[in-house]
Amino acid sequence: MITSKDVFDASEIGKRIKQVREALGYTQPFIAKLCGMSPQAWNNNECGRDRMSLEPALRLCAATGATLDWIYRALAAGMPPELLKPPVKRAPQRSSRRKPSISSRAKARTSSHSSSSTSAGS
Protein backbone atom coordinates (compact mmCIF):
# COMPACT_ATOMS: atom_id res chain seq x y z
CA MET A 1 0.00 0.00 0.00
CA ILE A 2 1.32 3.43 -0.95
CA THR A 3 1.21 5.95 1.86
CA SER A 4 1.16 9.72 1.50
CA LYS A 5 4.71 9.79 2.86
CA ASP A 6 5.85 7.54 -0.03
CA VAL A 7 4.13 9.75 -2.62
CA PHE A 8 5.89 12.90 -1.38
CA ASP A 9 9.28 11.21 -1.21
CA ALA A 10 11.92 12.85 -3.43
CA SER A 11 12.75 9.54 -5.11
CA GLU A 12 9.08 8.93 -6.00
CA ILE A 13 8.74 12.45 -7.40
CA GLY A 14 11.94 11.83 -9.32
CA LYS A 15 10.48 8.67 -10.87
CA ARG A 16 7.44 10.60 -12.05
CA ILE A 17 9.37 13.49 -13.60
CA LYS A 18 11.66 10.96 -15.28
CA GLN A 19 8.58 9.22 -16.69
CA VAL A 20 7.35 12.53 -18.13
CA ARG A 21 10.76 13.31 -19.65
CA GLU A 22 11.16 9.86 -21.20
CA ALA A 23 7.58 9.79 -22.52
CA LEU A 24 8.39 12.94 -24.47
CA GLY A 25 11.78 11.66 -25.59
CA TYR A 26 13.59 14.62 -24.02
CA THR A 27 17.15 14.57 -22.75
CA GLN A 28 17.95 15.73 -19.24
CA PRO A 29 19.79 18.88 -20.45
CA PHE A 30 16.89 19.82 -22.74
CA ILE A 31 14.15 19.47 -20.12
CA ALA A 32 16.34 21.14 -17.50
CA LYS A 33 16.57 24.20 -19.73
CA LEU A 34 12.78 24.18 -20.22
CA CYS A 35 12.40 24.21 -16.44
CA GLY A 36 14.97 26.94 -15.90
CA MET A 37 17.47 24.79 -14.06
CA SER A 38 20.90 23.31 -14.65
CA PRO A 39 21.22 19.75 -16.00
CA GLN A 40 22.88 18.76 -12.70
CA ALA A 41 19.95 20.15 -10.69
CA TRP A 42 17.52 18.24 -12.94
CA ASN A 43 19.51 15.05 -12.48
CA ASN A 44 19.51 15.53 -8.69
CA ASN A 45 15.71 15.87 -8.81
CA GLU A 46 15.21 12.92 -11.14
CA CYS A 47 17.47 10.65 -9.08
CA GLY A 48 15.73 11.61 -5.86
CA ARG A 49 18.69 13.36 -4.23
CA ASP A 50 16.69 16.61 -4.14
CA ARG A 51 12.95 17.25 -4.13
CA MET A 52 11.80 19.38 -7.07
CA SER A 53 10.79 22.86 -5.94
CA LEU A 54 7.60 24.55 -7.06
CA GLU A 55 8.96 27.00 -9.64
CA PRO A 56 10.65 24.38 -11.88
CA ALA A 57 7.65 22.08 -11.38
CA LEU A 58 5.32 24.81 -12.65
CA ARG A 59 7.59 25.32 -15.68
CA LEU A 60 7.58 21.57 -16.30
CA CYS A 61 3.79 21.57 -16.23
CA ALA A 62 3.58 24.53 -18.63
CA ALA A 63 6.04 22.96 -21.07
CA THR A 64 4.74 19.38 -21.04
CA GLY A 65 1.12 19.29 -19.90
CA ALA A 66 2.00 17.38 -16.74
CA THR A 67 0.12 18.36 -13.59
CA LEU A 68 1.34 19.30 -10.13
CA ASP A 69 -1.00 16.63 -8.78
CA TRP A 70 0.94 14.05 -10.77
CA ILE A 71 4.38 15.36 -9.85
CA TYR A 72 3.78 15.76 -6.12
CA ARG A 73 0.86 13.45 -5.32
CA ALA A 74 0.89 10.76 -8.05
CA LEU A 75 -2.70 11.60 -9.03
CA ALA A 76 -3.13 10.84 -12.71
CA ALA A 77 -6.41 12.74 -13.21
CA GLY A 78 -5.92 15.47 -15.79
CA MET A 79 -2.65 14.06 -17.10
CA PRO A 80 -2.26 13.64 -20.87
CA PRO A 81 -2.43 9.87 -21.50
CA GLU A 82 0.77 9.88 -23.57
CA LEU A 83 2.72 11.06 -20.51
CA LEU A 84 1.51 8.13 -18.44
CA LYS A 85 2.65 5.45 -20.85
CA PRO A 86 5.98 3.79 -20.13
CA PRO A 87 8.63 4.87 -22.63
CA VAL A 88 9.35 2.64 -25.60
CA LYS A 89 12.68 0.91 -25.11
CA ARG A 90 14.84 1.48 -28.14
CA ALA A 91 17.75 -0.66 -29.19
CA PRO A 92 21.08 1.06 -28.59
CA GLN A 93 22.26 2.98 -31.61
CA ARG A 94 25.59 1.97 -33.08
CA SER A 95 28.01 4.77 -33.64
CA SER A 96 28.19 5.86 -37.27
CA ARG A 97 31.83 6.76 -36.81
CA ARG A 98 34.17 3.87 -37.30
CA LYS A 99 37.24 3.62 -35.17
CA PRO A 100 40.38 3.08 -37.20
CA SER A 101 42.04 -0.23 -36.54
CA ILE A 102 45.52 1.27 -36.64
CA SER A 103 46.31 4.79 -35.53
CA SER A 104 47.78 7.21 -38.06
CA ARG A 105 50.99 7.31 -36.03
CA ALA A 106 51.25 3.52 -36.17
CA LYS A 107 50.56 3.59 -39.93
CA ALA A 108 53.33 6.13 -40.41
CA ARG A 109 55.75 3.93 -38.47
CA THR A 110 54.71 0.86 -40.47
CA SER A 111 55.10 2.59 -43.83
CA SER A 112 58.48 4.08 -42.89
CA HIS A 113 59.74 0.63 -41.81
CA SER A 114 58.56 -1.04 -44.99
CA SER A 115 60.06 1.64 -47.27
CA SER A 116 63.42 1.54 -45.44
CA SER A 117 63.54 -2.27 -45.63
CA THR A 118 62.86 -2.26 -49.38
CA SER A 119 65.54 0.37 -50.05
CA ALA A 120 68.03 -1.56 -47.89
CA GLY A 121 67.47 -4.75 -49.93
CA SER A 122 68.21 -2.99 -53.27
Image: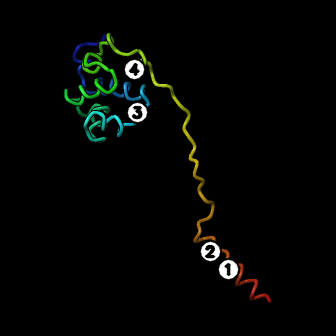
Find out whether the residues at labels 4 and 1 contact each other: C-beta distance under 8 Å: no
Please, what is the three-letter code of the amino acid marked with disc 3? Tyr
Image x and y of residue 27, in percent: 40, 36
Please, what is the three-letter code of the amino acid marked with disc 2? Ala
Q: CA distance from mark 4 to mark 1?
A: 62 Å
Find out whether the residues at labels 2 and 1 contact each other: C-beta distance under 8 Å: no
Name the foreground residue: 37 vs 119: 37
| Residue furthest out toward the left | 54
Which residue in the protein does label 1 denote?
113
Say which element carries label 1: helix
Of circles 3 and 1, the one toward us is 3
Name the foreground residue: 33 vs 115: 33
First of labels 2, 3 by sequence position: 3
Find out whether the residues at labels 4 and 3 contact each other: C-beta distance under 8 Å: no
Of circles 2 and 1, the one toward us is 2
Say which element carries label 4: helix
Find out whether the residues at labels 3 and 1 contact each other: C-beta distance under 8 Å: no
Disc 4: CA contacts within 10 A as few (<14), some (14-19) or many (>=20): many
Find out whether the residues at labels 2 and 3 contact each other: C-beta distance under 8 Å: no
Please, what is the three-letter code of the amino acid marked with disc 1? His
